[in-house]
Image (cartoon, rainbow, N blue to C red):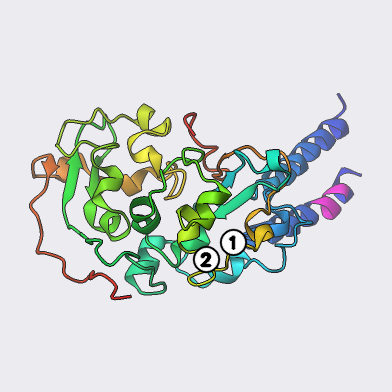
Amino acid sequence: MKLRYCFHIIPLILVFGVVQAEQLWKPLASDGLHDPKSPAIGVLQEPADALSLLPKDGVGNKVSWVRALREQYIEPRTNILPETIIEVIDLDIVMEKTGEMPLVRFPHKPHTEWLDCKNCHDKIFIKKVDANPVSMLAILNGQYCGVCHGAVAFPLTECNRCHSLVRSSFLGQPGAQPVKSADTSSTPNSR
Amino acid sequence: MSKFKLFGSKLAFILFVICVSTMVGAEYADVVLNRMAEKNDMRPVIFPHWFHRIRFRCKVCHHELGFEMRAGANEITMGKIIDGQYCGMCHNGEIAWSVDNCHLCHSGKAGLKTGIRGSNETGGPGRW
């Protein structure tokens, strides 16, 4: 009798699981936030319609936003006000107080392609190496990197994206790394 | 407990886990804004980051337009929006739909609390 049970139930579970796995983005009407009776349903764009066209990621919105920008799947505006100065800098900061985990390499480039200096400096991070008592506990509590990572940027389950430098093979000094050549590829929109 | 009952309860557990995991649905980084909406008989506002990220870099809203990067920290009112501040900088009928499309923003379920929604990977840290 047990065996018969398996033949019926397990395939159902597998099909159900596959169906759920395929559904990367919930329809607005069933995302638990939008009111399915709202007149917005049917007018607002469904996430799947837009996000399925962008480079994939396994977490968050399931989209790699940095790749989407770099490979020109999207062309988000850099500014609305004409006098806004755009500053993309290619400066890596290596953080070595990471216990047994690999060192953290913080890359300014992908961050400054999206954010302004003032978004982090100095309210979230003081612009000086070793001036910020960053710890995983603080990050998990929504401070420092955790202001965005876990909310808008990729979540904190992706340890190795930040902890990417194996200690034994890193031969440089912690802190600010030598600046690479000036990046002139990001220029303000003329619109 | 007989072997059959144990099998049945394990099965029930697996089915329960599958069902619960599908209940987590809100799109990552959706922000619920309900400081004043429901008190004024409007549905809470759902702000979708994903739709706006495709069109604008973070710095446009969070530097030029003055949005603080914390849900509920911005005292947004319809008056300010109509005046061209905050959402009204773009939602003026020129860059994006105009402000008389109430229900396109005010589209949330009743009772939602202000805050940013993560996903099952992070329920969001305590400070949010």
Q: Which image quadrant: the C terminus of chain A? A: bottom left
Magenta: main secondary structure:
helix
Tell which subunit mark 2 falls on.
B
The magenta segment is A5-9
> What residue sits right under mark 1 in the picture?
B99
Residue placed furthest toward the top: B1
A174 displayed left or right of A22: left
Q: Nearer the viewer, residue A39 or B83?
A: B83
Disc 2 element: loop
> What residue sits right under mark 2 in the picture?
B92
Q: Nearer the viewer, residue B117 or A105?
A: B117
Is there CB contact under 8 Å for labels 2 and 1?
yes
Q: Nearer the viewer, residue A67 or B101?
A: B101
Disc 1 packing (10 Å; few <14; some 14–19; many ≥20): some
Q: Residue at x 32, y 69 (%)?
A: A70
Q: Residue at x 61, y 60 (%)?
A: A25
Q: At label 2, which amino acid type do we have?
A: Asn
The x, y position of residue A132, in whole percent, is 22, 31
Residue B29 versus residue A66 in the image, above or below: above
Q: CA distance from mark 2 to mark 1?
A: 6 Å
Q: Earlier in the sequence, mark 2 or mark 1?
A: 2
